[in-house]
Image (cartoon, helix red, strand yellow):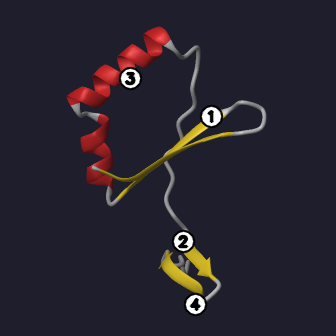
Amino acid sequence: MAAIRKGFVGEDGEEISIARFDSDDAVKAWRSHPEHLLTQRRAREAFYESYWVQVCTTVRDYEWRLKTGRIDRFVAARNSG
């Protein structure tokens, strides 16, 4: 379901996890998956006092490599209105 999932810890100790999905349907499937729901409940009971979720749409996605330079992976269609 999750195409990519990574976790990071900032210098201040704040933690961030990033999950990337192929579609809105994949997000919905993950969000309602029984194992995910159980993990959420356990984490709320044992670890978290609070957390923050953002669901975002990618506007631009590219990578840069010394040998190839910039490679555009995704560019959202621009709203002409």
Q: Secondary structure at mark 2?
A: strand
CB under 8 Å between discs 4 and 1: no
Residue 18: give x, y in percent of width and height.
Answer: 51, 47
CB under 8 Å between discs 2 and 3: no
Q: Earlier in the sequence, mark 3 or mark 1?
A: 1
Q: Earlier in the sequence, mark 2 or mark 3?
A: 3
The residue wearing badge 2 is 61
Q: Residue furthest left?
A: 34
Q: Secondary structure at mark 4?
A: loop
Q: Residue at x 56, y 75 (%)?
A: 62
Q: Earlier in the sequence, mark 4 or mark 1?
A: 1
Q: How far separated are the C-alphas under marks 2 and 1?
A: 23 Å
Q: Residue at x 77, y 38 (%)?
A: 11
The residue wearing badge 4 is 68
Q: Secondary structure at mark 3?
A: helix
- The residue type indicated by label 1 comes to Glu
Circle nearer the viewer, 2 or 1 = 1
The residue wearing badge 1 is 15
Give the left or right position of residue 40, taking residue 52 as reference.
left
CB under 8 Å between discs 4 and 3: no
Q: Count of labels shown?
A: 4
- The residue type indicated by label 4 comes to Thr
Q: How far separated are the C-alphas under marks 4 and 3?
A: 41 Å
- The residue type indicated by label 2 comes to Asp
